[in-house]
Amino acid sequence: MTQVTPLLEVRHLRKYFPIRGGLLNRQAGVFKAVDDVSFSLPRGRTLGLVGESGSGKTTIGKCVIRLIEPTAGQILFDGEDLTQLSSGDMRRKRAQMQMIYQSPAASLNGRMTIGQIVGEALLIHEGLRGRAAQERVLELLNVVGLKKEHYHRFPHEFSGGQQQRVGIARALAVQPRLLVLDEPTSALDVSVQAQVLNLLQDLQDRFQLTFLFISHDLGVVRYLCDKVALLYLGKIVEIADVQTIFEEPRHPYTQALISAIPEPDPDDVREEIILKGDLTLRRPDRGCPFAPRCHAAKLDICETIEPPLVDTGRGHMVACHLHPGVAS
């Protein structure tokens, strides 16, 4: 059986930021925003990156398309290592990967019309201008559910949902293969969220797009994603297909997050797991990063040795000393 090369493969990605202080502002240490993260994303599929604020989700997304430079690791896009490309080569490659941001209003230039915003990508990457560019922009607006009369309007004249549709149209303008979606619905009303999520699904089917979906909302992730990776303080603690994550969560952190999801059925009573303390961005010097907040029965090893991410069966990867078995 021929093994299909994933569209995106991240290997041992690290992103460290310097911590500076003192009178001379010297580097006193590093903040490990992303620490040894690996995953793969097949063509036409959706991988969800889930975790609390500060877990490293957005940093991973920005590293993938090199909006920020990784400290170490490989980012393979269709088999080519993006970390080895020059800035010019990366700029040309970036047409194949686009990012849609959390706040649509902040990502759109308020001094430009919608036609100019979407058409700018066509000018930069394809040299398209004039009537040809206008026709293409109008076609893109129609694809995302906007109207012809929206072409000459400015971003402030639109609702949040419409602004996000403009952001999606801009991303689609260069015919990308990968979209990095950084919490694209978190700033929208619930009813509008559903509309945008349905639009994204339709576009994925229509254009054979691949999604890296960043979110803290497990309900949205369950609806849209094929596979889920749970992040805690810059490390993946569990990764599996979406059904397995929700039906058989194995890491205590995943179990706690899922227990907090509101249950619509009043007869389905589920005990919520309350984590100890608050999330701190400072990781313990040794042992499991989650150990200080873990609700499960801890072993002595939890405080001293960091657990590796291992396959516990059928591609279900878990970093927890309570699940040490590796599938044969």
Image (tube, helix red, strand yellow):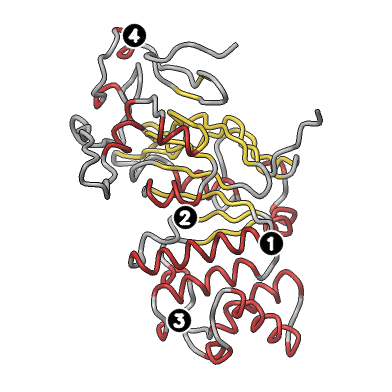
Name the residue: 36% across, 40% down.
20
Q: Describe the element under mark 4 as helix, strand or loop.
A: helix
- Residue type, mark 2 in image: Asp
- Labels 1 and 2: the sequence-earlier one: 2
Q: Is residue 26 above or below residue 195?
A: above
Residue where numbered disc 3 is placed: 155
Task: Depth check: give the residue in front, 237 or 65.
Answer: 237
Q: Is residue 19 above or below residue 324?
A: below
Crowding around mark 1 (Cα neighbors within 10 Å: few <14, some 14 to 19, many 20+) is: few
Name the residue: 42% across, 64% down.
194
Q: Quadrant of residue 98?
A: bottom right
Crowding around mark 4 (Cα neighbors within 10 Å: few <14, some 14 to 19, many 20+) is: few
Image position of 247 (left or right of 265): right
Task: Depth check: give the residue in front, 293 or 56.
Answer: 293
Query: Considering the image in quadrants, where does the C terminus appear?
Result: top right
Residue where numbered disc 4 is placed: 301
Give residue 182's mark: 2
Q: Are marks 2 and 4 in contact (CB under 8 Å)?
A: no
Number of the front mark, 1 or 4: 1
Query: Considering the image in quadrants, where does the N terminus appear?
Result: top right
- Residue 30 in the image, given as x and y percentages of width and height: 41, 33
- Labels 1 and 4: the sequence-earlier one: 1
Give the Cα distance between marks 3 and 4.
54 Å
Residue where numbered disc 1 is placed: 207
Give the Cα distance between marks 2 and 4.
35 Å
Q: Describe the element under mark 2 as helix, strand or loop.
A: strand
